[in-house]
Amino acid sequence: MKKIGVISDTHGKLREEVRQILADCDMILHAGDIDTYKVLEELKKIAPLYVVRGNADTQWAADIPKSLHVQVQGLHFFVIHNKDEIHEDISNADIVIYGHSHIYEEKSRKNQVWLNPGSCGPGRFFLPVTMAVIEVKDDGTFQITQKNIAEAKSTHLESLKTKNNADLNKIIHFIMRDIDKGVQVEKIAKKYGIMEEDVDRVCRMYLTHPGIDVDGVLNRL
């Protein structure tokens, strides 16, 4: 039997709990948004690593492929960061691995299993910190287990909740505009009279989801 650790969206952070789970794995599949070369090197020391490049992986990751095919015990895995960017025939894949949303997802599509292990890096957007482990038997049958690393933290966004809907929409729009201009988080917070940690959450959501609009940010916060 082969044990595969499936992770995504580490965003520069490799938690000790994740290390412990991966230490018992025969290989690691990483669905992108590694963020730093250091995390990549640490993962390589734990087990053979197969990784794709995410939208947050900049020039340092230019040599990392955007998608890849891996075979284990007769199973065909297809790995990509953003499932919306699949532009090739993957009909021969048994399991499709992806990330990007930070939300754990496991579903069947025709004869395939589509798996997003969620994010196992920094806790963000009120979401739990998760990963997955796939146990593949010699006959090619497999079992997927979700691993919950940390529960979602209650973050109240109190400084944004004091605004009415119209003001909140305007503020999110202005924050996104200032991000594009390169304005620092502390300056944005002071400018609009809100907490830095609230601005930071909006910034991270905006930067990790290219093309997202104001409603998209509000729906995910």
Image (cartoon, grey):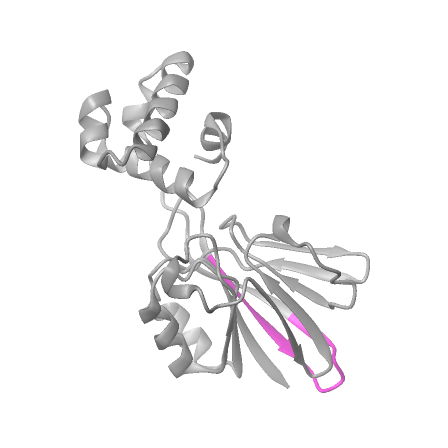
Q: Which quadrant of the structure image shows residue 9?
A: bottom left
* Residue drawn at (52%, 65%) of the image: 52
Residue 57 picture location, percent across and down: 41, 58
Residue 26 picture location, percent across and down: 53, 84
Query: Left or right: 194 with respect to 82?
Result: left
Vertical arrangement, residue 86 with respect to residue 196, above or below: below
Vertical arrangement, residue 118 with respect to residue 74, above or below: above
Residue 31 picture location, percent across and down: 52, 62
Q: Is residue 23 magenta?
A: no
Residue 28 picture location, percent across and down: 51, 75
Front-most of residues 164 and 215? 215
Front-most of residues 29 and 135? 29
* Residue drawn at (48%, 57%) of the image: 54
* Residue drawn at (31%, 18%) of the image: 162
Q: Quadrant of the N terminus?
A: bottom right
Which region of the structure is painted magenta?
Answer: 130-143
In this view, the residue farthest toward the right is 110
Vertical arrangement, residue 197 with respect to residue 10, above or below: above
Query: Left or right: 22 with respect to 96?
Result: left
Q: Quadrant of the C terminus?
A: top left
Q: Is residue 140 magenta?
A: yes
Front-most of residues 7 and 65? 65
| Secondary structure character of the magenta stretch overall | strand
Q: How many marks?
A: 0
